[in-house]
Amino acid sequence: MNRPSSAVDLPPEAFRELGHRLIDRIADFYASLSARPVTSPDAAENIRAFLGDAPLPESGESAGDALERAAQFLFDSSLHNGHPRFMGYITSSAMPLGALADLLAASINPNVGAWDLAPAATEIERQSVRWLAELIGYPADCGGLMVSGGNMANMVGFFAARKAKAAWPIRSQGLYGGPRPLTLYASRETHTWVQKAADLAGLGTERIRWIETDAEQRMRVDSLEARIDEDRGRGCHPFLVVAAAGTVATGAVDPLPQIAAVTRRHDLWLHVDGAYGAPAASLPEAPEALHALGEADSVALDPHKWLYCPLEAGCTLVRDAGALPDAFSFHPDYYRFDSTEEEPRINYYEHGLQNSRGFRALKVWLALSCVGRSAYVERFRADIALARRLYRAAEMHPELEACTHGLSITTFRYRPPGLDDGADSEAYLNRLNEALVAQLQREGRVFVSNAVVGGRYVLRACIVNFRTRNADIDALADSAVCGGRVLHRQLG
Ligand SMILES: *Cc1c(COP(=O)(O)O)cnc(C)c1O
């Protein structure tokens, strides 16, 4: 029987031709990136016009035409986080090598759920995990795995902690098996993954004790310890402290050595959220506290942030390699995989939430192989220097107010001359700066996001972008001043 021909099974010659054409288009896109707007002001309209509300196609169109149309559409209607003037959120410029790595990974398409299904890919993942540990100063004999991003990486650490520190068989009995409610501690600056985790694990978000921060947005260790003592006295079961190695809003690093001393004293699990900031631990001049990452029981980090890998790539590291199978492993009848003492074979489906797993590790492994530690260190340093330049520019300019600088994140705001210091002025400045962020994002010449620091609504630039240069930083400061003046005339 002849099988019907369709795009399902592109003949190798057709694949070669389409692939070469697409790679040419992508190379042109990279070359044109800095001349494009960061985002098109008409993006929403273009998207509606392109997609319409067409029903599911009954028969397929030519793959060449569809690829061409999709590429053009995406180049024209996306928010380009690879643009030199994209400094919003914590989304990095992705290295072009990562696009090639993803193409290769999808071509082999190994299922990295078990060693037998993906021997080469499993070992590449294992080596990537170890290299990431080495980069950030974590014990190289740790366990760990690749996940989709920071949220999942943190959740894996959370579930490892829950299993390790519950004093009863929580995996079979659940929370109902324990006499006292599991309780965890995190600073107010913690990313919302912690609410999702407490919710989904059945603890409820009220089991999170929000610990106050100091003037630099770092967890206050005295408050932490007082709260743990108080909870113990009230019959709670403290099990986990979440500390930040680079908070999402301002890049603050919690006092990790002091927090580690508290968790040791009270036999709690220390999880460090380094989704953004952990790579900076490779810098000798990094904040002292970052050099204590090795004391954590688990660490989350995001290669798709500061390591410039394309989305999605997160990673959890755990000091005790057995902690992940302890927390996640079941043995279904349909999986029989051998592993011996001499030749231990990791089956990653036992180490996390996923069963079938893609080959995320390849882009991370290739990035670490081809960039190497010292070039990465230089990149982190350059990003931090750009954030510092922005902070200084804001300090120097009479109409800008520098607010914070932590790692490669700077926050600042526009402040029109002649405003007094009262509460009315603060409320007005918040409105003005909120409008300014929205306007800058709409215009598409530079892209920043916002933070709220001590009640102040501020512009926030996070530089995890190897394409950003001094001139781009200066353009951001200029745009903030010009946009701020215009808005002040309209609102003031
Ligand atoms: C980005 C970030 C997260 C969430 O990571 P995703 O990759 O977006 O899921 C969590 N914590 C911190 C500190 C982050 O910067």
Image (cartoon, helix red, strand yellow):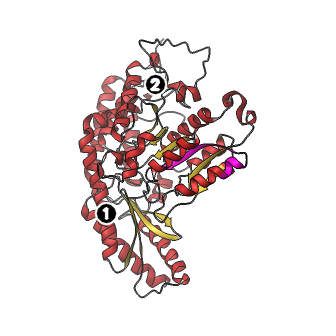
Left or right of 330, for residue 312: left
As for residue 240 lying within the magenta part, the answer is: yes
Instruction: Report whether residue 467 is seen.
Output: no
Image quarter of residue 127? top left
- First-in-chain label (2 vs 1): 2
Q: Nearer the viewer, residue 234 or 128?
A: 234
The relative height of residue 252 versus residue 112 in the rendered view (above or below) is below
Instruction: Compute the Cα span from label 2 to label 1.
Output: 41 Å
On whether ligand 1 comes within 8 Å of the CB at mark 1, the answer is: no
Badge 2 element: loop
Indicate the position of residue 22 as horizontal and vertical percent values: 31, 39
Mark 1: few, some, or many residues within 10 Å (few <14, many ≥20)?
many
Task: Label 1: state its secondary structure.
Answer: helix
User: Circle 1 sits on which residue?
Assistant: 388
Q: Position of residue 194 (x, y in %)?
A: 58, 48
Which residues are the magenta region? 230-246
